[in-house]
Amino acid sequence: MSSANPVCPKDFDWSKHYPIVAKDSPKCVEFLDIGCGYGGLLVELAPMFPDQLMLGIEIRVKVSDYVRDRIDALRKTHEGKYGNISVIRTNAMKFLPNYFEKAQLSKLFFLYPDPHFKKKKHKWRIINTNLLAEYAYVLRPGGLVYTITDVIAMNEWMVSHLSAHPLFERVTQEELEQDPIVPKLYQSTEEGKKVYRNKARGENHGDGEVRVAVFRRRPDPPRT
Ligand code: SAM
């Protein structure tokens, strides 16, 4: 689980991350949690989708070390379980195509992303027009982008950028109600738990309203 970035996806040995994957196996990561923090979503989803490989990407060294230790401990105490989740410390804004092939992923998660409130810091927001082209590249047609935040400005930013992109379309409320992942978005992560703890105490640091928005990767337009 080192932080050296591979030159291209085929250079990366995923078997070191996942005990359920044999070396040179074609099995690949399909769910990606970008800015996974302390890994709560991965831990929640691991038993729900035992055959899917899931990865968290986290830029902070100590936090990604924590997630690695958390997963190791879970694997030890629950034999044969949690072999489908792992974490990498890297900068998701720079290195996604080093790790993932075109159309490899079926789900991308952005849970409570950093809002970077000041206008001159908006370029650090994890969803922006340039990065959406990269997310569309690694996500397969029909794949889903899940977002959640308690900062209204951040929800509006993500929704407006995703809605404006020709390769994404918003998933309807009716569809969200059928998706077993959606209820897990709210409080499985540490940031989500904090938001709800603060709400219960009447101490809102965000806007007091938690908003989910999910978008589907459209098929590529036909080549002319
Ligand atoms: N998703 C987690 C949760 O809900 O608890 C963490 C939310 S926290 C507000 C945002 C996380 O994104 C932080 O852990 C931060 O270190 C990470 N992050 C920010 N920019 C990143 C980047 N470029 N690549 C990877 N992780 C990043």
Image (spheres, rainbow, N blue to C red):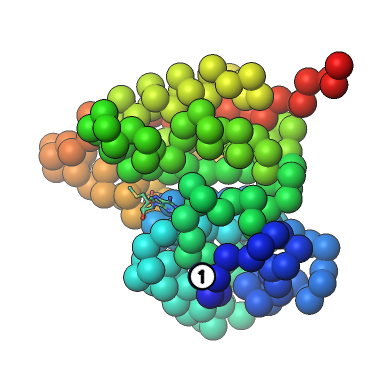
Quadrant (top left, top right, bottom left, bottom right) of the N terminus: bottom right
Give 163 or 190, whichever is nearer the viewer.
Answer: 163
Residue shown at the point (66%, 77%) measured from the top left: 16
Q: Is residue 77 above or below residue 185?
A: below
Is residue 104 in sight in this rendering?
A: yes
Which residue was labeled with disc 1? 3
Q: Local crowd at mark 1 within 10 Å, few (<14), some, or many (≥20)?
A: few
Whether residue 40 sits left or right of residue 180 in the image: it is left
Q: Quadrant of the C terminus?
A: top right
Circle 1: residue type: Ser
Residue 5 appears at what percent x and percent y? 58, 65
Residue 17, located in which quarter of the rendered image? bottom right
Q: Position of residue 25 (x, y in %)?
A: 82, 69
Q: Position of residue 21 (x, y in %)?
A: 75, 72
Q: Nearer the viewer, residue 63 or 20?
A: 63
For the residue labelled by badge 1, is the local secondary structure a helix, a strand or a loop? loop
Going by the image, does 187 lie left or right of 220?
A: left
